[in-house]
Amino acid sequence: MKTSIFDSIVFGPIQSRRLGVSLGINLLPADGKLCSFDCIYCECGLNEERRTKSRMPVRSDVKKALEQKLVALKEEGITPDVITFAGNGEPTLHPDFGGIIDDTMEVRNRLCPAARIAVLSNSTTLHKPEVFAVLNKVDDNIMKLDSVSDSRIRQLNAPVSPSFTFDNLLRQLTAFNGNVIIQTMFLKGECRGENVGNTTEEEITGWLEALRQIRPKQVMIYTIDRNTPVEGLLKVSPAEMESIAGRARDLGFRVSVSG
Ligand code: SF4
């Protein structure tokens, strides 16, 4: 199925299912995808199909593009709710991620002080103290947790690093001391002849236990909404999504459902 990539540093604003009016920032190359996961549901496509030839944008260009866009939006009377680091892969892979966040905070404070700064991350770089510290200071650090099972994580997210494990991930997410938002993609179906659904009772019970330990300030659950690079993946029904959300709400978590 056809997937898509972003061909500019700043994109949108778009009406995001989860975030409101979101002005996106893509720190990855504009001609492909660069990610430390290779999720079977990735809207950008699979890593192998989206090899990049160009480089990541430099810090000064990111700042300039954001300034220009916010000035233009101001003239149109548009104020984004959130400036969101997302795009063609994992934003924390950018070597100047920390400096870019500092620039973004300065530009936001000057041109668009009501907007929040969000980072959609796949949680693979939390072992780097400098990345952890930067994520801990943005308004919304939205971290991926799709399964509590290493084998399911390998099916769904296909981490590039063989050393990525759920136990390490749980320890790293818990280290935010609650200053974190958890994002989880729930889906059903098959991939390469294997069942890949992560809504079994065992999965949900484990996921709720992980939330209990992480104590996130918010939980975002969503299901497939756009094209996926592999066939056979299915949406989870609204009723089942609400049922999962209800169980997390019963534990006291603030949960949003989309998709
Ligand atoms: S973490 Fe995000 S960008 Fe990376 S493969 Fe998964 S869905 Fe795609």
Image (cartoon, rainbow, N blue to C red):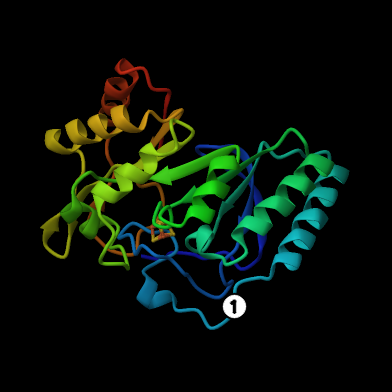
In this view of the protein, can residue 238 be seen by the observer? no
Q: How many labels were placed on the picture?
A: 1
| Quadrant including the N terminus | bottom left
The residue indicated by pointer 1 is 55
Q: Position of residue 256 (x, y in %)?
A: 43, 29
> Closer to the camera, 163 or 146?
163
Q: Residue at x 44, y 75 (%)?
A: 50
Could you tell whether 150 is left or right of 144 in the image? left
Q: Position of residue 213 (x, y in %)?
A: 30, 30
> Closer to the camera, 207 or 256?
207
Could you tell whether 164 is left or right of 79 in the image? left
Give the quadrant of ligand 1: bottom left
| Residue type at numbered disc 1 | Arg
Place residue 214 in its image quadrant: top left
Q: Residue at x 32, y 48 (%)?
A: 169
> Closer to the camera, 87 or 75?
87
Place residue 253 in its image quadrant: top left
Residue furthest to the right in view is 75
In this view of the protein, can residue 218 be seen by the observer? yes
Q: Is residue 207 above or below residue 62?
A: above
Q: Residue at x 71, y 62 (%)?
A: 62
Q: Position of residue 241 (x, y in %)?
A: 30, 31
Circle 1 sits in a helix, a strand or a loop, which is it?
loop
Q: Position of residue 43 (x, y in %)?
A: 42, 59
Q: Is residue 58 above or below residue 206?
A: below
Q: Is residue 229 above or below residue 131?
A: below
Q: Residue at x 58, y 81 (%)?
A: 54
Residue furthest to the front in view is 129
| Quadrant including the C terminus | top left
Could you tell whether 99 is left or right of 255 in the image? right
Category of crowding for the residue at label 1, using alpha-carbon neighbours closer than 10 angstroms: few (below 14), some (14–19), many (at least 20): few
Q: Report if the beta carbon of the residue with label 1 is closer than 8 angstroms to ligand 1.
A: no
